């Protein structure tokens, strides 16, 4: 599994490379902070708390008995595409070559 990247809300930039969702109002390039603000606006004042502290709720999981109290939070995560296997091998070979030179 690929490790998730934490990002800096003010400095990291996202570029939408596919169809731009309507809620982004035609913006293709946004900072993480701008993206979160745009999503807050799209959700509206009452539901924007899903992105902040969350909304109190409870859940009944299929594999557990009874209700569990908690908060429902929507989080923004960036998941990098996996490197093609050939590229992984090339990187490993380059690292091995560098280590052998030392």
Image (cartoon, rainbow, N blue to C red):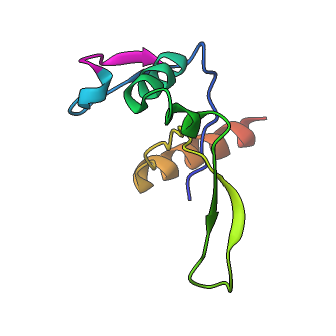
41 over 95 or under it: above or below: above
Q: Residue at x 60, y 20 (%)?
A: 9
For residue 97, which quarter of the picture?
top right
In the rendered image, the vertical position of residue 36 relative to residue 88, given as above or below: above
Query: Does 29 lie within the magenta span?
Result: yes
* Picture residue at 63% right of the left edge, 42% below the top: 54
Q: Which residues are magenta?
A: 25-31
The foreground one among 100 and 93 is 93
Q: Can you say whether 70 is above or below 18 in the image?
A: below
Q: Percent x, y for residue 89?
A: 50, 52
Q: Position of residue 73 (x, y in %)?
A: 60, 46
Image quadrant for the C terminus? Answer: top right
Residue 39 against residue 33 in the figure, above or below:
below
Q: Quadrant of the N terminus?
A: bottom right
Task: Name the residue: 45% across, 50% down.
Answer: 82
- Outermost residue on the right side: it is 102
Is residue 49 shown in magenta? no
Near-viewer residue (55 or 88): 55
Residue 77 spot, x, y in % from top left:
54, 40
Viewer-nearest residue: 34 or 91: 34
Q: Residue furthest top?
A: 11
Residue 7, given in percent of the width and then of the height, sits at 62, 28
Q: Total marks drawn? A: 0
Residue depicted at x 20% and y 32% = 19
Residue that lies at the very extreme toward the left in this rendered image: 19
């Amino acid at each position: 599994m690929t490790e998730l990247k934490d990002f800096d809300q003010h400095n990291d930039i996202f570029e939408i490379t596919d169809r731009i969702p309507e809620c982004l109002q035609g913006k293709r390039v946004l900072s993480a902070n701008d993206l979160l603000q745009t999503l807050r606006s799209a959700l509206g004042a009452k539901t924007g708390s899903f992105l902040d502290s969350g909304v109190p709720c409870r859940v009944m999981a299929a594999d557990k008995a009874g209700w569990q109290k908690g908060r429902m939070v929507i989080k923004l995560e960036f998941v990098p595409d996996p490197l093609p296997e050939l590229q992984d091998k090339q990187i490993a070979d380059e690292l091995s070559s560098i280590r052998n030179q030392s």
